[in-house]
Image: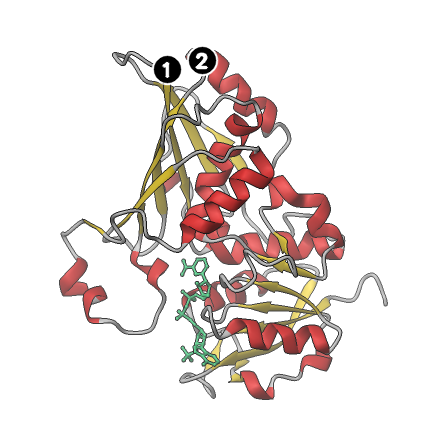
Amino acid sequence: MNIHAPVPVGVLGASGYVGQELLRLLAHHPGAAIVFATAESAAGEVIEGHRLGRADDAPLHAAEIVLSALPHGVSGRYVHDARAAGKRAVDLSADFRLSPEAVYGLTEVTRPRVAAAELVANPGCYPTAALLALIPLAQQGLIDASREVVIDAASGVTGAGRAPRRELLFGEVTEDFRAYAVGNEHRHLAELRATLAREGGFSGDLVFTPHLLPVKRGILETIHVPLTRVLDQATAEGLYQAAYHGEPCVVLTRGTLPSLKDVVYRNRVAIGVVPVANVRRPRLTVIAAIDNLVKGAAGQAIQNMNVMLGLPETAGLAC
Ligand SMILES: NC(=O)c1ccc[n+]([C@@H]2O[C@H](COP(=O)([O-])OP(=O)(O)OC[C@H]3O[C@@H](n4cnc5c(N)ncnc54)[C@H](OP(=O)(O)O)[C@@H]3O)[C@@H](O)[C@H]2O)c1
């Protein structure tokens, strides 16, 4: 292959919120060109200059790599078709995140495995922020497994996808704020537990409560971490600095804490830490923020694609 020719990329589910973000980011990618983009109800529409075909008719032969932003439960079949056609793939749905068939694509943590992978399972949006916040502590044995790690997370409404639902109407969500999947039942928990055990060696309890925030995009997580020993501010910050030294898509805030404006439209996670005062046992509060559609989905998928193809990791991305 001519190393200067753009890599042909196919996008499945291009009319969804994540798929549209993939098209928007790939339009400015210096080393990739979209060769097909699919939709279901929106087939025939034009987005970012691409007429959307149907997934069943996707010309898989034309792509070198396929990015799937199809719903979970639907994506797996089409990704298998792409693999059967000899194509590498990044699946943005949940279909392969717990499967030995795929490499889990939390880029900063699994980069060497992503580079060699034929199929990458892109992490969920909530897990991306939580895992990047927790893995450095877990790897150092600093999380007390006899107590629960509590993750309170809030996401903008694009996190729920573009298919119309009454509870997501403007009139239902605006000027409101509510928890959902309360009781530790969210499907991201299995992914969180499995990855924290595999990559961080931590298998204690997690309590995860998502909230619906009436903004378009962005996730902010407040993570309450029980520690095995006291960490002062400088030590805690130094630990994250060491873990993410040289990482282009991780921003560690000092003297301030992350908020959504630090991350929206960027392929970055922003992390800030504060030791908790006035408690008897040591505890750290970690605040992590991402754009659910970028570092939480399309941006990280392109970051993984770049790693798989040997392109500069942040090509086409603003971190
Ligand atoms: N939204 C997020 O923040 C986020 C973050 C991380 C991961 N994800 C994952 O990424 C994937 C896409 O999420 P999304 O929020 O973009 O969802 P979405 O807005 O609902 O988009 C889904 C896409 O799949 C297409 N589609 C739906 N059913 C189909 C079928 N039976 N056959 C072929 N195509 C079909 C849709 O086409 P039409 O619209 O034309 O019908 C649309 O292009 C999901 O698996 C989701 O879990 C989402």
Report the residue marked by disc 1.
Answer: 282
Residue placed most toward the observer, 21 or 55: 55
Coordinates of residue 142 in the picture (x, y in percent): 49, 21
In the rendered view of the protein, which quadrant contains the N terminus? bottom right
CB within 8 Å, label 2 to label 1 = yes
Q: Amino acid at mark 1?
A: Pro
Query: Could you tell me how far apart the alpha carbons at marks 2 and 1 are, in whole angstroms?
Result: 6 Å
Q: Quadrant of ligand 1?
A: bottom left
Q: Which residue is mark 2?
A: 229
Indicate the quadrant containing the C terminus: top left, top right, bottom left or bottom right: top right
Indicate the position of residue 274 as horizontal and vertical percent values.
Answer: 37, 20
Residue placed at 14% from the left, 52% from the top? 175
Looking at the rendered structure, the secondary structure element under dot 1 is loop
Relative placement, left or right, of 72 versus 26 is left
Task: Report the side of 171 relative to 308 (left or right).
Answer: left
Q: Tell me which corner region of the image, top left, top right, bottom left or bottom right, holds residue 278.
A: top left
Residue 144 horizontal/vertical position (percent): 43, 23
Number of numbered labels in the structure image = 2
The residue at 15%/62% (across/down) is 172
